[in-house]
Amino acid sequence: MSSFEVRKGYESERLLIEFQAIPTGKFEPLWDTVLLSLKAVLVSTEDVWENDEHIRRYISPIGKFILAISNWELPFIMADDFEIENDDNSVVLAFAEALVKSGQFAEISTSEK
């Protein structure tokens, strides 16, 4: 089982989900299962070579979100609509709930939400 943490972003009150390092080949099937449960649709992809990461943007009934995976296979999930902070955090918390419900991910708590 893979694990993740919901935490505040650097110098921010906005929440994000940080996964443990997980090989992309193992992460992708788990990710696809969660996306199906959320009825998420891929909107765009970006290869941001300056930041050494690959970004996928999604929309779903819970809101817009981003999956960013670094070249070091560190996945992060963040809300994609930074207009209202509380709405952003609710998207991240709803996603965290879906991860746990999938039975494939366990939430660890090492920082304040």
Image (tube, rainbow, N blue to C red):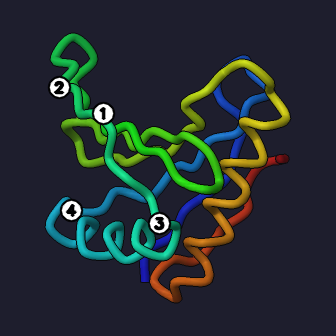
**Disc 3 packing (10 Å; few <14; some 14–19; many ≥20):** few
**Disc 2 packing (10 Å; few <14; some 14–19; many ≥20):** some
Q: Looking at the picture, does residue 34 appear above or below residue 49?
A: below
Between discs 1 and 2, the one toward the N terminus: 2
The picture places residue 15, in percent across and down from the top left corner, at 71, 39
State the residue at coordinates (40%, 43%): 67
Disc 4/disc 2 C-alpha distance (Å)? 18 Å
Instruction: Give the labeled residue for mark 1.
Output: 55
Which quadrant holds residue 106? bottom right
Disc 1/disc 3 C-alpha distance (Å)? 19 Å
Between discs 1 and 3, the one toward the N terminus: 3
* Labelled pair 1, 4 in contact (Cβ < 8 Å): no
State the residue at coordinates (53%, 53%): 60
Instruction: Give the labeled residue for mark 2.
Output: 47
Disc 3/disc 2 C-alpha distance (Å)? 24 Å
Disc 1/disc 2 C-alpha distance (Å)? 6 Å
SS under mark 2: strand
**Quarter of the picture holding the N terminus:** bottom left
Q: Looking at numbered disc 2 in the image, what kind of residue is underneath it? A: Asp
Between discs 1 and 4, the one toward the N terminus: 4
Between discs 3 and 4, the one toward the N terminus: 4
Between discs 3 and 2, the one toward the N terminus: 3
Instruction: Give the labeled residue for mark 4.
Output: 23
State the residue at coordinates (59%, 37%): 79
Mark toward the viewer: 1 or 4? 1
Q: Looking at the picture, does residue 109 appear above or below residue 103?
A: above
SS under mark 1: strand
Q: Looking at numbered disc 1 in the image, what kind of residue is underneath it? A: Ile
Left or right, 89 with reference to 106 = right
Instruction: Give the labeled residue for mark 3.
Output: 39
Left or right, 92 with reference to 33 = right
